[in-house]
Amino acid sequence: MPAPAPASERADVLDSALDPATADLSKAAVPARPRSTAGIPSAGNPSVGSDADPLLPPELTSRLTGRLDHAVGSFVDDPDQAVREADEALDETVRELTGRLQERRASLRDAWRTDGDRSPADAPSRTEDLRLSLRAYRDLLQHLLAA
């Protein structure tokens, strides 16, 4: 059994596989049709997220950062209260991130799960939908793991 390809090669294949710009569509079983992009990150659909899409909105990030800065700045005057404030800011951040990640995960799942009404002729478009979904999962996980 051959060794798996390095991650960088697999990413290249994922990004280029079935890419409408490079694919040989002359062998396609069905004419091309618009594909569902629900839950797939793009300029028109920021609900799922990508590297350019922050996990938290800027105004919330700014508010939470301000709370932490206040806690750090007040440490000398009241260390116990400063740590409590930092703990509360972290607690709110975790709650917000958890809720937003659950929403994104649901959007990702909705994008690739089928409702059973596809025919075998839809296989090429189904494969493309799955490729886009896998890329969206990869992008979100890489965004999270790079943080």
Image (cartoon, rainbow, N blue to C red):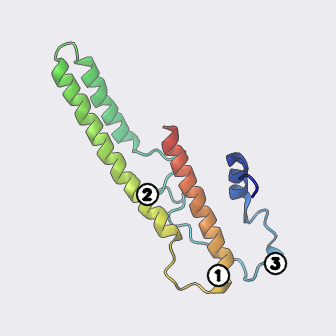
Q: Distance between the residues labelled 3 and 1?
A: 14 Å
Q: Name the residue under label 2.
A: 104
Quadrant of the rendered image containing residue 90: top left
Numbered badge on residue 58: none
Q: Distance between the residues labelled 2 and 1?
A: 26 Å
Dot placed on the residue nearer the N-terminal end, 2 or 1: 2
Q: What element carries label 3?
A: helix
Q: How crowded is mark 2: few (under 14 residues within 10 Å), some or many (20 or more)?
A: many
Furthest-front residue in this view: 1
In the visual, does 75 lie left or right of 99?
A: left
Q: Name the residue under label 3.
A: 27
Quadrant of the rendered image containing residue 52: top right
Dot placed on the residue nearer the N-terminal end, 3 or 1: 3
The three-letter amino acid code for the residue at tag 3 is Lys
Q: Mark 1 points at which residue?
A: 122
At 61% from the left and 62% from the top, the residue drawn is: 132
Q: Is mark 1 on a helix, strand or loop?
A: helix
The three-letter amino acid code for the residue at tag 2 is Arg
